[in-house]
Image (cartoon, rainbow, N blue to C red):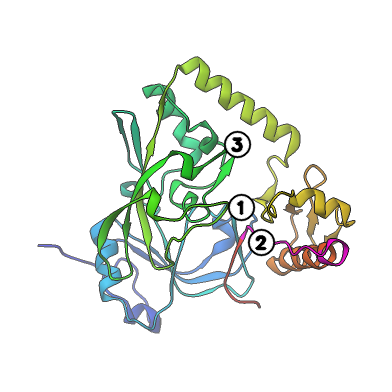
């Protein structure tokens, strides 16, 4: 029998509305600790499921009027200062971080960190996925935006994904059915990725290490390193580069409160240590307006913005 127990008890009305689970409910958790920007308000409830069955139970029995969203590693996320009402799901249990490899493929749990992929590629001599190792965050967050760098994208290496839909049903979907294109996809908002299977290429440990080191050195030389940032802020318009438009429009030295444009790469916004989410979002919107005035091109946010303003 599948038994549930509530690990976090209090008198909060939302807690009382939620189904009993084997995972954890955490109340009023600061999401600034869960994002690379290091800013943002609280999650009303954070739910960390213990495994797939626990997550399915939650999705099938939660009240329909309770808002639910999912966060990954927080590397491409700006949480607004007012926080996120409802339930924020994070697949942070080890059961969602498992990896299996063989026959030219590797399957990674959605909560597995991209950076930790390196040791598995080296162990099994699997090439073709080195670019993923340099993308911050977790594997599950790479699909919806078709993450990519160094000339490769997820669509180039993804074979399939196991997902849970909004009704709590598990199914496997092929990459070809997701409409993956530049920083976008047809991935439904109510689907949750459980794992992703990637195609690989036979390689040597020496070649894998060479490519990984090359990528690392490039990022250290051309992008902000060990700073509070969320990667590229804006998508590249077709045939153009966002950073060039930003620089051309006189935005390279802009600053709002504790947020500023990176001196190394002007498509990166930096939290200098005292920024609020409002500072960062205001700076981003200011750049959009200035670029539009100067070039008649409207930049689109690549960073996901979540929550309510304070």
Locate residue 218, reporting x and y percent. Answer: 69, 31
**Left or right, 55 with reference to 235:** left
Q: CA distance from mark 2 to mark 3?
A: 21 Å
Q: Which of the marked residues, 1 or 2, is nearer the chain's N terminus? A: 1
Q: Residue at x 43, y 27 (%)?
A: 121
Q: Residue at x 45, y 16 (%)?
A: 204
Mark 3 packing: few (<14 Cα in 10 Å), some, or many (20+)?
few
Extent of the magenta region: 292-303
Q: Quadrant of residue 302?
A: bottom right
Mark 2 packing: few (<14 Cα in 10 Å), some, or many (20+)?
some
Q: Residue at x 51, y 31 (%)?
A: 130
Locate residue 288, reporting x and y percent. Answer: 77, 65
Most distant residue in the front direction? 239
Q: Secondary structure at mark 2?
A: loop
Up-down: is 303 above or below 203?
below
* In contact (CB < 8 Å): disc 1 and disc 2: no
Screen quadrant of the N terminus: bottom left
* In contact (CB < 8 Å): disc 3 and disc 1: no
Mark 1 packing: few (<14 Cα in 10 Å), some, or many (20+)?
many
Residue 301 is marked as 2
What is the magenta segment's predominant secondary structure?
loop
Residue 151 is marked as 3
Locate residue 7, reporting x and y percent. Answer: 31, 66
Q: Which of the marked residues, 3 or 1, is nearer the chain's N terminus? A: 1
Q: Secondary structure at mark 1?
A: loop
- 3 or 1: mark nearer the eye: 3
């Amino acid at each position: 029998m599948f038994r549930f127990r509530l690990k976090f008890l209090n008198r909060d009305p939302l807690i009382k509305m939620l189904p009993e689970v084997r995972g954890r409910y955490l109340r009023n958790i600061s999401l600034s600790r869960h994002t690379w920007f290091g800013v943002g308000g609280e999650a009303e409830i954070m739910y960390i499921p213990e495994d797939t069955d626990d997550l399915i139970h939650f999705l099938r029995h939660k009240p329909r009027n309770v808002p639910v969203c999912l966060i990954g590693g927080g590397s491409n996320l700006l949480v607004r200062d007012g926080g996120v009402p409802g339930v924020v799901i994070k697949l942070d249990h080890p059961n969602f971080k498992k990896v299996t490899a063989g026959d030219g493929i590797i399957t990674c749990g959605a909560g597995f960190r991209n950076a930790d992929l390196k040791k598995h590629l080296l162990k099994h001599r699997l090439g073709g996925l080195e670019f993923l190792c340099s993308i911050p965050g977790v594997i599950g967050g790479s699909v919806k935006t078709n993450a990519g760098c160094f000339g490769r994208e997820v669509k180039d290496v993804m074979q399939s994904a196991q997902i849970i839909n909004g009704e709590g049903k598990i199914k496997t979907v092929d990459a070809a059915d997701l409409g993956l294109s530049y920083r976008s996809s047809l991935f439904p908002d109510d689907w949750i990725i459980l794992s992703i299977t990637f195609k690989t290429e036979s390689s040597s440990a020496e070649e894998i290490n060479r490519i990984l080191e090359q990528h690392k050195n490039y990022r250290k030389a051309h992008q902000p390193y060990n700073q509070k940032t969320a990667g590229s802020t804006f998508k590249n318009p077709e045939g153009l580069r966002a950073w060039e438009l930003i620089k051309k429009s006189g935005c390279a030295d802009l600053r709002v409160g504790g947020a500023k444009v990176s001196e190394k790469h002007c498509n990166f916004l930096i939290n200098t240590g005292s920024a609020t989410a409002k500072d960062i979002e205001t700076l981003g919107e200011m750049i959009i307006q200035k670029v539009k005035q100067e070039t008649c091109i409207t930049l689109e946010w690549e960073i996901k913005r979540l929550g309510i303003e304070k």
